[in-house]
Amino acid sequence: MGALGRAIVVAVLLALCAGEGHAWTKGRRSQTFEIGRVSGLVLDGHLDDWGQAFRAGPFASAEGGVTDPTDLDVTASIGWAANSLWFGVTVRDDNAGPGIRSSLEGDAITIRVSDRSDETRFLIVSVTPPARDVLPSRIEVDPRGSIQPSVDAVVLETQEGYTAEIQIDLSAFGDGAVGLELGTQVQIRDRDRRGSDDVVWFPWADLSVNMAHTLRLAEHASRPVRGFAFGSYPALLSTRVEVVADSSLAGKTIRFADGDEILSTGRLEVRGGRAVATLDAEMPPLGRPYRNPAVIIEGERPIGVTIPDADERRAWQFGWHRLRFMPYAFTGSTFPKAVFEAPLMARDMIGPYTIETEYYDRNYERVTEATEDGRYGAVVSIKAGDRTYRRFRTLYKYSGFIPWWEREVDAMIDLPEEFGIDTAVLDGKRAVVADRLKLMFWSGLSRDQRIGSFLAGLREAVPGEGDEGFYDAIWERDRQWWVGLKRKVYGQTPVEPINAPTGVFKGRAPELVFGSEEEAGFRPGVAAAIDSLCDAWWERSGEPMVVCVARAGKIAHLKAYGHRNERPVTLSTRAPIASMTKLLAGVQMAIAIDQRRVDPDASIATYLPAFEGVSGADGLSVRSLLTHTSGLEGHWGDEEHDFEEQIAGYVPQMEVGRTYKYGGTGYAIAGKVLEAVSGEALPIYLKRHLLEPLGCVDTRVSGTHQDGQSTALDLARIGQLLLNGGAYGDFRFFEYEALQELLPAPLSKHLPGTYRMQGLGTRMFSDEGLSEHTYGHGSSSSTIFRVDPENDLVVTVARWRPGADYEHYKRRLFDTIGSYFPPKTETDTSLKGN
């Protein structure tokens, strides 16, 4: 295949990338309900004696949508009496009938109650239905709650599912008088043959943060809430509200209103066992989002509508609204102009706007004409009102005219077998395939914003160098070029090089070497026991893996198991580490913190000029970005040169520190911080200051949150670096103080009312069989990374997928390792953490 053919194939693959959604918080509203005093209740599981209780239901799914009522349907009654809070929950489950208990394993009712006058005072209790006839219901008070109340509960099996009656002692909240306000969240978990469902009664589905409805103790209860409503903005053109209510309300007229303004009217009708309706209205104008949206049902209490803030939705969508050059690769001296792919939609998002573009040559000189072939940078300024939004694009200029319709191209692509196309057929249609790839490449000159980077990278490559190294690839060179250009655009002076790692001046830090079981601090037989277990794991799951277990700096077990794609897996076979990439980003940030380049609690405007003067940016820090408390979500942005500009346009709508929401977008912004303070593109920074000095030759990472590939041994080296407090062999990467910033710590200081612990790319794993101080990070590929400082232990397992019984074998692995620790004595100080 010729060079152009290879270029076409790469461009086609790049075109397959897609955007990601975003889960919002702004617009979610808590409501206040009065719960009545109930007297004479007997804790027996029967709910026919609840009198003045407040009633709510059906519940929405955890995502804010509808569950199938034939699978799971929940209503609840809530009351109070004699300093106790009472919950009566009715669960209709499709597993009802004889033997229901055998199918309820994993089902649970979880309730969080907090003091509205002091959100740090909260309790979490879970009631689990009996999974077998011989077992009682389980009541668990979560130890992470700051209040540990007494709880009683009774669960009764019914023909349709079960009922639960739960009594929670309120003594810790005072004397339980009329007027006491309690934040309340309720979650019902259903695990059955269809999979799993969670239904909730509160605005946000994370029990670790206090986004809750308010219950006020009263003599008489508020009118029941017999439904829920959630809204969206299809294509940002209109408002759509979906209403779900008790089936007895079918036929009633409903109105969608914002305050006193009626926006739409409809009627409830029976569908799928519930009363439902869809209401459409105009989307609120820019700058005038809904303030108090509700659905009014005749004769019923208004139902609050869970709907995003309209301006927040516009700001988020505008961040990745397509700005195009026609084309990105051009001929002649006149630069192409930037235009929005959907200009009217852009105007709806930000208001009337103008576009201005500055052009820079490959030497960072500003130019008005393209006088030479090759790379150019376009800095686009979109001005709307008092805001200026910037976007960065790489353009490519070539000479001459290409008659694409006449040009024959030798190109081929190996299609995945899932398409069901015989390879012999594909080979016989080479001309058709080549022509199609040619047209897609031609189209990409105007549609693919990375085509300029691609062509510029090929032009700048040295003839005869062959396949380039991962960290010297086209995209990494393009990223480094933009790191430099952005410093000029923002008027920044050159940055001093990062001086890391440095030498270890007091001795030599432990580095991983093979050792005997005794040298590693294990009783004899640990390697054979691990080997036997992993053989069984491979046989059961059919998923290959490489396992590394090291203690006291000595590798006691390192072995590959199984095969993949008909080839044996070896110790150097790279596996996807997925979200474990975040841990590597945290280690990189620890280096920058140690070098005094970054203060994790300072505003990111300190480091990224795109955020200077932006409303809301003062509260956005590296710590909030890396602990998932920034208000950002999703996994994207590393590859965008202007990602900080995209997010800066969204920051005024963000709600920093309101909730915990896992994602990688915050990590991508933190990556831009690292590039700004070091002057190095992130992949280059990672290679120079971490991977290469550590000897991690088989690790490939270009981003901050999901794209990494590595081996069990390379990951173990990083684990040993952390065990050593930031040193490895002859190198000191960061001091102990920077390590403390990296490690998990309570988030309650930054997110009041949460029980979560989170570090800069790390979290605790205290309940897996190792010590309670064990930390690491998870991975959707099921790769395992655990560091146990108390036992001086590193465990890494490189995997591709979980496979059957993953949790079972993972726990057995940790239990097996722990069972070979020799008994500790009071005088044993050989291990760290003692």
Image: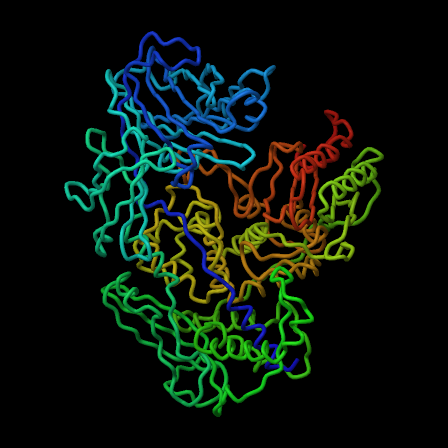
**Residue 609 can be seen in this image:** no
Query: 285 above or below 488?
Result: above
- How far across and down, in percent of the image, does residue 666 sit? 45, 53
Query: In percent of the image, x 54 and y 23: which residue is there?
Result: 100
Question: Which colour scheme appears in the figure?
Answer: rainbow
Going by the image, does 812 lie left or right of 609? right
Residue that lies at the very extreme toward the left in this rendered image: 260
Q: Quadrant of residue 497?
A: bottom right
- How far across and down, in percent of the image, does residue 11 sit? 54, 73
Looking at the rendered image, the quarter that the C terminus falls into is top right
- How far across and down, in percent of the image, does residue 667 sit? 49, 54
Going by the image, does 751 lie left or right of 236? right
Mark count: 0
Q: Quadrant of residue 611?
A: bottom left
Going by the image, does 512 lie left or right of 781? right
Query: 629 above or below 826?
Result: below
Residue that lies at the very extreme toward the bottom in this rendered image: 400
Query: 107 above or below 644?
Result: above
- How far across and down, in percent of the image, does residue 382 sit? 31, 69
Query: 308 above or below 159?
Result: below
Looking at the rendered image, the quarter that the N terminus falls into is bottom right
Of 764 and 56, the residue lying toward us: 56
Of 675 and 57, the residue lying toward us: 57
**Residue 535 can be seen in this image:** yes
